[in-house]
Image (tube, helix red, strand yellow):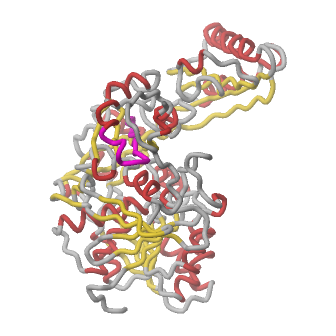
Amino acid sequence: MKLRELAHGRTGDKGDTLNVSVICFDARVYPHLVRHLSAERVKAHLQSIVRGPVRRYELPRIGALNFVLEHALGGGVTRSLALDAHGKSISAALLDMDIDIDIDIDIDIDIDIEPPA
Amino acid sequence: MSTVTPSRTIRIGAGAGYSGDRIEPAVELVEHGSLDYLVFECLAERTIALAQQARRRDASLGYDPLLEARWRAVLPLAAKRAVRIVTNMGAANPVAAARKTLELARELGIDRLKIAAVTGDDVLEAVLAGHYRFEESGERVAAFKDRIVAANAYLGAQPIVDALRAGADVVLTGRVADPALFLAPLIHAFGWSMDDWERLGQGTVVGHLLECAGQITGGYFADPGLKDVPNLARLGFPVGEVREDGTVVVTKVPHAGGCVTEATCKEQLLYEIHDPQRYLQPDVVADFTEVSVTRLGADRVAVSGGRGTPRTGTLKASVAYFDGFVGEGQISYGGPGALARARLALDVVRERFAMTGVAVRELRCDLIGVDSLYGHTAAAHETQPYEVRVRVVARCDSFDEASRVGNEVETLYTNGPAAGGGVAKSVREVIAVQSVLLPRETVAPSVQIFET
């Protein structure tokens, strides 16, 4: 399945560094992403964009991973020749990753609907 | 001014998330948000450098270009409702911004208004006089001496707190850390001390959630079918209901568009964060790792658990410098064979640059619709787009050299592949930004008061 069916996130920029959050729609998915969504896998998936190392930070309380991608912005937002100098479209590319995880739950992604009482 | 009891909640609204942000949602907040404070965050990395250039041309300018429009829209009602305003719209000239605000207040018939200008962020002299190296590249700042346009330190909450304590209704700053714009009203209202690291950490969480305005109420979020946001065109800006212990409920004006959910709050929490355990601010090193995000009801999300450790001995300063020109040209191809014609166009342009000796320091050739966002990916290879737009962009030393880039693309009209259309060309001056770390003692903030 695609990562975007399991998680959402957004990109932020600072100098020549991007961060992309990957936040589980359902907290039960989190341990599986910790196991399968490594910094190496992210770097490989985004290799056409990211020139530097990728670090991963874990936030179990909110079921999220934070990836920091160095040298991903063509020398920095203010100098880059890239069309998307801020790299804001990168989160969509990351969430397009194929991810095989064997969990057997119904993932509730109706996140703007009242949960059952 | 009302006294604060421990059970009091402070309501802070975010009236702008960047310099060019919409004005109607700020008006909506003043009208319906029952606010105590309204914050306008309007300074990105480069904005202050552009403002500095404006000030050089005219000493009465250098504040945010939308300042007057924003004040005309919100100031009378904000003054009537005693909503205190904090903003970095002072940009490169907080004093001029304060004078302009005074002038507008008189024109708009606002009885009594106390305005504060916070300065001291301009550290150009100190940076040029020192022996600093850029944090990003390691290069000596002195090597850029002739090209430096501005240097501004990120101030913390203290001068804003001082201004609020002095009774200012409107506080105009230059460069401050964005969360500090929200932290200062909390410190002032609740009497937090500047070494209460846990409170300052949670207060930083509050500021970080609200500082991008619409980004927490459903902006930069919608993905139709997967993440739906109601009434996106009428996106409302957020209100933070903050308790004395710093815990916040993020919400919005009920009838405004958008939504506040655990998902929107988590995305904003991690926006532009690197190591969540060490989010460096002038006033504290904030720790987001223990933060919890809990839905309380429709468009009401509680966020707590922000922590902090002592602040460092340095302040970050952004140094802006002139870095050449960028020339660009674009042309579109469509229909069968569009990709082949676009590739031919790029080959022609590359060969022409080599032939005619256009001096480029860096050249980039994109196919918009194929590889302009993500480069050479598998998806890009599989595609046969019905429309594709060629983009040629180059960094050059002079305006004239940069113009040749767009001109070369334009000549494809009569000299290039069939059916190319919609040429656009441009040249822009580049102001690049890198940062240095200054010892805290180098920076001396100050507050000036202006009254009607």
Q: What is the quadrant of the N terminus of chain B in the image? A: bottom left
Nearer the observer, B322 or A59? A59
The residue located at (53%, 76%) in the rendering is: B101
Q: Quadrant of residue B281?
A: bottom left
The residue located at (46%, 34%) in the rendering is: A3
Classify B202 as above or below B337.
below
Classify A89 as above or below B122.
above
Classify B87 as above or below A50.
below
The residue located at (53%, 22%) in the rendering is: B375
Classify B2 as above or below B345.
below
- The image position of residue B8, as x and y in percent, is 33, 85
Q: How many marks?
A: 0
- The image position of residue B244, as x and y in percent, is 28, 78
The residue located at (48%, 59%) in the rendering is: B216
- The image position of residue B392, as x and y in percent, is 63, 23
Nearer the observer, B310 or B159? B310
Q: Is residue A108 magenta?
A: no
Nearer the observer, A63 or B339? A63
Residue B197 makes an appearance in the image: yes
Range drawn in magenta: A15-31
Q: Quadrant of residue B424?
A: top right
In the visual, does B237 lie left or right of B301? right
- The image position of residue B344, as x and y in percent, is 71, 10
Residue B96 makes an appearance in the image: no
